[in-house]
Image (spheres, rainbow, N blue to C red):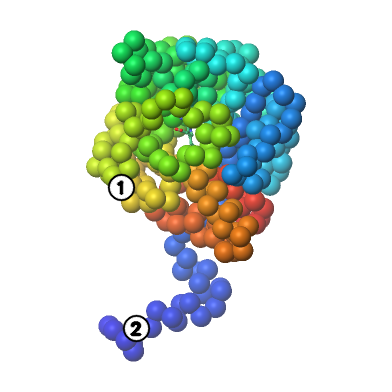
């Protein structure tokens, strides 16, 4: 039946009618707020490109976590900024390291809040790459796996509810799973950054985390933005290795990848609305070019519609406030 028998505008006439037939719901229960925690200062260091986002001392991070939880955000994703870095990323698996201390402090203050920890070496290596370097100047995959597993164990021991490897080494999910199981953490889920692209949209994050590579780029381990079949392979491999949730990152330029990964894996899929995506909206809103609230809700609804079950976003607290 075509027009005039069919008129799609009939169900758009009132807000209540539109609500009845809405296909995608965006709810605070789906949101994860990234938090940057730094050692060696008691202050809050704002990130220029990301208004509203800062690096926090542990005490201030606990307050941020508490406020987010009170607003309805169920989970945070912790990134650490250590006081010192070295070639072996020893700060990453230090039991008194920044993420380990912050995890303990947040779990003690807000036990119901889900604490997910980012597992990567880039914030802890002096050169800023996501793994250790081999003598021939490449990121050494297999040596890095051991350090990542140690890091994940130290996070689980500090009380992390889930660990999220973001390094893109081959075999890291299996390495983390077997070590976590061997060391008494069989119930700690792995949120794998399965399809993480070598993206220009991470720029502001690298300022926030102080993790820009000192030389070269990340294209020998992060994915080529042009590839979607490969993203599906990455996700399927991670599921095989034991990933509980697979993530696609960034989100908005990769909505097709989110959809394909969801259809191929049928496991919970997370999408990371990254720093550059956040910075763009903030800058445009500050310049009076768009309505921030409407733009953010539309973008996050689009990420959900593409197939994401979980959305990691710096907008999480504000969105939870708007939705509640
Ligand atoms: C670290 C990591 C990055 C992000 C999350 N974990 C940056 C990178 O790979 O350079 C980016 C997050 C964002 O841009 O918001 N491996």
Q: Is residue 51 left or right of residue 210?
A: right
Residue ID at (48%, 77%)? 12
Secondary element under disc 1, as helix, strand or loop, is helix
- Residue situated in front as seen by the camera: 61 or 158: 61
Point out the residue furthest to the front here. 215
Secondary element under disc 2, as helix, strand or loop, is loop
- Report the Cα–Cα distance between label 1 and label 2: 31 Å
- Residue situated in front as seen by the camera: 86 or 231: 86
Q: Which mark is residue 277?
A: none
- Residue 57 at x, y percent in the picture: 70, 27
- Residue situated in front as seen by the camera: 31 or 40: 40
Q: Is residue 167 left or right of residue 311?
A: left
Residue ID at (67%, 28%)? 106
Pointer 1 or 2: first along the chain:
2
Depth check, mark 1 against mark 2: the one in front is 1
Which residue is labeled 1 in the image? Answer: 260
- Residue 3 at x, y percent in the picture: 32, 86
Which residue is labeled 2 in the image? Answer: 6
Residue 161 in view here: no
Is ligand 1 closer than 8 angstroms to the Cβ of mark 2? no
- Residue 289 at x, y percent in the picture: 57, 64
Residue ID at (61%, 63%)? 288
Point out the residue furthest to the bottom here. 4
Image vertical order of residue 45 relative to residue 11, above or below: above
Q: Is residue 324 left or right of residue 227?
A: right
Snapshot quadrant of residue 216: top left
Residue 106 in view here: yes
């Amino acid at each position: 039946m075509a027009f005039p028998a069919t008129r799609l505008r009939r169900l758009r006439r009132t807000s209540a009618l539109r609500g009845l037939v809405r296909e995608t719901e965006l709810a605070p229960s789906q949101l994860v707020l990234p938090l940057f925690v730094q050692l060696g200062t008691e202050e809050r260091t704002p990130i220029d490109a990301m208004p509203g986002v800062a690096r926090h001392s542990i005490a201030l991070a606990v307050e941020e976590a508490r406020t987010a939880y009170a607003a309805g955000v169920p989970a945070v994703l912790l990134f650490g900024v250590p006081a010192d870095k070295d070639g072996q990323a020893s700060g990453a698996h230090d039991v008194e390291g920044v993420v380990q201390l912050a995890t303990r402090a947040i779990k003690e203050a807000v036990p119901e809040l889900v604490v997910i920890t980012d597992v990567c070496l880039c914030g802890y290596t002096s050169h800023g790459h996501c793994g250790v370097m081999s003598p021939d100047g490449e990121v050494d995959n297999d040596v890095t796996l051991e350090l990542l597993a140690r890091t994940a164990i130290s996070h689980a021991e500090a009380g992390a509810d889930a660990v999220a490897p973001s390094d893109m080494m081959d075999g890291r999910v299996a390495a983390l799973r077997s070590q976590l199981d061997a060391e008494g953490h069989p119930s700690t889920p792995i949120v794998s950054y399965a399809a993480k692209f070598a993206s220009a949209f991470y720029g502001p994050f690298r300022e926030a985390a102080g993790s820009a590579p000192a030389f070269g780029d990340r294209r020998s381990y992060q994915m080529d933005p042009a590839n979607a079949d490969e993203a599906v392979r990455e996700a399927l491999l991670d599921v095989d290795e034991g990933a509980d949730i697979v993530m696609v990152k960034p989100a908005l330029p990769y909505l097709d990848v989110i959809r394909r990964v969801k259809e191929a894996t049928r496991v919970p899929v997370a999408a990371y609305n990254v720093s550059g995506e956040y910075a763009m909206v903030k800058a445009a809103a500050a310049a009076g070019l768009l309505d921030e609230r409407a733009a953010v809700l539309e973008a996050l609804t689009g990420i959900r519609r593409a197939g994401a079950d979980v959305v990691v976003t710096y907008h999480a607290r504000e969105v939870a406030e708007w939705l509640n």
